Amino acid sequence: MQIKVDRELCTGCQTCVSSCPYDSIVMSEDKALINEYCQLCRACLSVCPEGAIKEYKDSPAEIKQGDLTDYKGVLVFAEQREGHIAHVAFELLSAGRTLADKLSVPLSAALFGAGELAAAELIKWGADTVYLCDDASLTRFNDEPYSELLSKIIIEHRPEIVLAGATAVGRSFFPRVAARLHAGLTADCTSLEIEKGTRNLLAIRPAFGGNIMATILCPDTRPQMATVRPKVMKTSGYDTNRKGEIIKIDKPQKASRTKVVDVVKDDSLFNISLQDAEVIVSGGRGLGGAKGFEVLRELAGLLGGTLGASRAAVDEGWIQYGHQVGQTGKTVCPKIYIACGISGAVQHMVGMQSSDIIVAINKNPEAPIFNIANYGIVGDLYEVIPLAIKKIKGDKGI
């Protein structure tokens, strides 16, 4: 449902402007215009003397839903960084392949700002078709052209399911696309399934602080859209002999109102991204202070890993937010996760419980973290960690 001004009927009397409690009606070229701040309160409908303000219950013609059976296929947005495909794209293709096979439909991918070699890699990971816009100006992410391009692909090819990573990029522009298409969007999913006997996507995600797992459906609109947390889906199905089609598309002619001037990288303690690390050494409130992370930093460096943290440690200001693991931080899946002084709140565990090996160090033998740990050490981390560092240095001859 939308409220719009018929500009042919509007006389520019401005009567409606003062009627809006949300200041969402502005004047543009001597005509009233309702902007994105409209809360659909309908206060303006009765005040216009010309009847120029109208309520539209259907979507605009260019994105009208129509028959839901017209939508077929699964589309994955393949995020790239500096021309290299992000690992979450391969995870989504593996999940998308499973969904597409259940629905007996093709799997496609959309790639912006990278070249044909990157597009060919997506085919090897399971895509049947790749919609590629290799314009160099798209190498750096920008909401407006990305939203325009993906919306165009969806309108033209009508996939029934569209997926993106719940990364900074996906969280930024994917809701814009969903709003433009009047489609349902479920954010931060940890699992995807198809409802038995239907073509409905079951988007599963933590809710109420991680205390329950909610299953969300969007049965009345298409496409069904979801963002998926990185590192929760396993990659599979890579085939160097796989064949597919690369379809090149042009960058939108519509001028962007914004321009990316520079990209400032996070000044973290390590150059290794949390979500790419194979070893993560994390600290929590049990460290007692910021100096505790210096001890963990030495251990992480010896193991070729990086530092993680619980929300409690970040809230105390002991370490930057970029290191936070958990529901309000990053979801990780390293080979080894060492939790030091972390009690194991459910919000933290949901972000790291899929790690291959979990080692917990805590003075409290009743700490919940021990329930999911492969190895548990009950003791003072300031005694245990130095012993571990000494042993590793001895084995390495340092």
Image: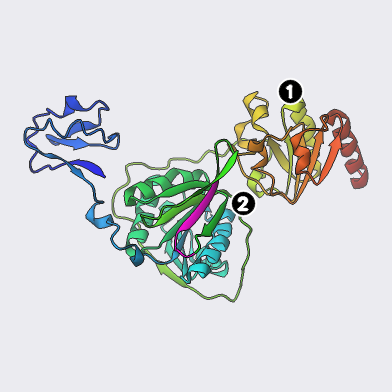
Quadrant of res 381: top right
**Amino acid beneath label 1:** Gly
Nearer to the camera, 105 or 214: 214
Query: Which residue is painted at 92% across and 46% down in the image?
Result: 395
**Which one is closest to the eye, mark 1 or mark 2?**
2
Determine if residue 112 is in view. no
Q: Which quarter of the image is occupied by the N terminus?
A: top left
Marks 1 and 2, the one that precedes in the sequence: 2
**Measuring 8% from the left and 43% from the top, which residue is drawn there?**
8
Q: Which residue is mark 2?
A: 232
- Residue 203 inside the magenta-drawn segment: yes
In the displayed structure, 223 sits above or below 17; it is below
Q: Residue at x 64, y 24 (%)?
A: 317
The picture places residue 390, in percent across and down from the top left corner, at 91, 37
The residue under label 2 is which amino acid type? Val
Q: Quadrant of the C terminus?
A: top right
Q: Is residue 236 left or right of residue 255?
A: right
- Say if residue 205 shows up in the picture: yes
> Residue 176 in magenta?
no
In front of the other: 335 or 86: 335
Q: Residues within 10 Å of mark 2 (few under 14, many from 20)?
A: many
Q: Position of residue 344 (x, y in %)?
A: 71, 35
Residue plotted at (64% across, 47% down): 275
Residue carrying label 1:
289
Which residues, given as a range, are shown in magenta? 197-205
Residue 109 spot, x, y in % from top left: 47, 62
State the image coordinates of residue 356 (x, y, percent, origin top left): 74, 51
Gap in angstroms between the C-alphas marked 1 and 2: 31 Å
Query: Residue 220 appears in which quarter of the rendering?
Result: bottom left
Q: Is residue 301 left or right of residue 75?
A: right
Identify the image quadrant of residue 41.
top left
